[in-house]
Image: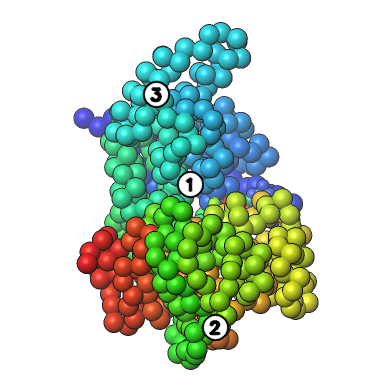
Amino acid sequence: MGAMRTLLEMKNITIEFPGVKALDNVDFSTETGVSHALIGANGAGKSTLMKVLSGAYNHYTGSIYMDGKEVTIRTPKDAQDLGIQIVYQEVDTALIPYLTVGENIMLNETVHDMGSKQFVNYKEIHRKATEVLKSMHIKVSSKKLVSDLTLAEKQMVLIARSISKECKFLILDEPTAPLSHAETTELFRIVRDLKAQNVGIIFISHRLPELFEICDEITIMRNGKFVIKEKIADTTQARVVEYMLGQKLEEQFPKFQGEIGNKVLEVKGLYDKSVVKKVNLYIREGEIVGLAGLVGAGKTEVCKAIFGAEAKTAGEINIKGRSLKINNPYEAVKQGLALVPEERRKEGILVQETVTTNLSAANLKKFSKAFSFLNFKGEKKNAQDIIKSLGIKTPSTETKVQNLSGGNQQKVAIGKWLVADAEVYIFDEPTKGVDVGAKKDIFELIAGLAQRGKAILYASSELTEIMGITDRVYVIYDGEVVKEIETKNTSEEQILYYSTGGK
Ligand SMILES: Nc1ncnc2c1ncn2[C@@H]1O[C@H](COP(=O)(O)OP(=O)(O)OP(=O)(O)O)[C@@H](O)[C@H]1O
Ligand SMILES: [Mg+2]
């Protein structure tokens, strides 16, 4: 016997922020027991629509219905009382790091007890939290500190917290962006379990294959508007992309035959204190070199160690034959290195500053005195060029970066480093959280750098990207280079084989 379904409908939802109509008469509907994909380019309005549904805004117009009855959602409490729970795109800020997993899951109860100056019943809190974790087969101890968890574990704890309360609808805003393949599989298992318990899942992701694997229905948005709702079984990935971009996406990867010159960067016997082991690699002028490997293999650590952002315990770095000591990013930048880091919100951008400030040389100079040695084109002009070439969606150049959509913040972080006129560019997972159209822009940009003779290191766990954009690949396994191979002589399967420890 199937459980009673609840129908959720949003009608004519419109919301404006200074200079931007983020949602324009959007209709959205889904049911409990269904997993529903929400897709659209960066800045299309997905997160905003879900924030309206979870009570983050009260200045929108339009109506929301449950089983045909109009409901009021103007505060997070309104939404929670109706059983609508959300796990936001910014996982990192949603949990209290110095509390335990259990305290975080039972946060309302904990705070309530504390507020009323009652004795906080930790035993009871851990008992209840453990029950929730167990019901989801999540193997994280309730007594562990949140600051000791991996990103994936934090994600699971957030979901556990959501379903520990009344939960009819669970919204997951890009939950898989930081997860490895195995962790994603684990998350999907939880999603399927919840669906079987008649929870409605709303799932936002830029990875289409994922949506096609886990979702029953899909709603596509473009430019703050509803485009179409379809059954996954009745559509294709190509069709979805066409609806979301308003045009067909041709070949994702730029076709160019770069001219490969002399060695620019050479790394010999690189070690850091924990992960990186005897890494040897080189990159030549005009060459795009991949750093492939699973999430957690040590790619980020290799990038950071080269850039001096992580302490080296041994190793030599040569740039154009000069042997250099690079002990910090300041020296790295001075020697012609640039790193677009993976944790961009933390390390790459100043979210409280405007787009122009972030894209301007002044900011880079602030970031590191080393930039005062570099040559910059006209700053304003440069910022505008970057906005255009990366298709950054922003109401104006003076908008604060924190008001941009997640994907557009990523693009700013990438753009920022393009201002620096470096010899070697290191990109660490540059397409994370970026829509398919924007990915293409980023690939073109990187190919453009290579064409100008720059040396590129491209770290990614996405094998399609490694195959599509690189000339040569180093496969990292457990902090070590286990294979070097010409891209044209390999395959995704082969790289995966070495990535998982195959010899
Ligand atoms: N608090 C805010 N203040 C000003 N503008 C905002 C605010 N929140 C969202 N916007 C704007 O609304 C639009 C939609 O943003 P939203 O975050 O909903 O996009 P998204 O579809 O989730 O994109 P992404 O895939 O990049 O996460 C963007 O143009 C964004 O700049
Ligand atoms: Mg978003």
What label does residue 173 carry, if any? 1
Label 2 neighbour load within 10 Å: few <14, some 14-19, many 20+? few
Q: Residue at x 48, y 34 (%)?
A: 146
- Determine whether the beta carbon of the residue marked 3 sits less than 8 angstroms from the nearest atom of ligand 2: no
Question: Where's residue 253, x and y in %?
Answer: 44, 78
> Which of the two discs, 1 and 2, sits closer to the camera?
2
**Type of amino acid at the residue the image marks with label 1:** Asp
Callout 1 touching callout 3 (CB < 8 Å): no
Report whether the residue tagged 1 is closer than 8 Å to ligand 2: yes
Q: Quadrant of the C terminus?
A: bottom left
Q: Which residue position holds label 3?
A: 129
Q: Which residue is painted at 40% across and 32% down in the image?
A: 160
Name which residue type carries label 2: Gly
| Depth check, front residue: 485 or 469 | 485
Q: Nearer the viewer, residue 311 or 117?
A: 311
Mark 2 = which residue? 321
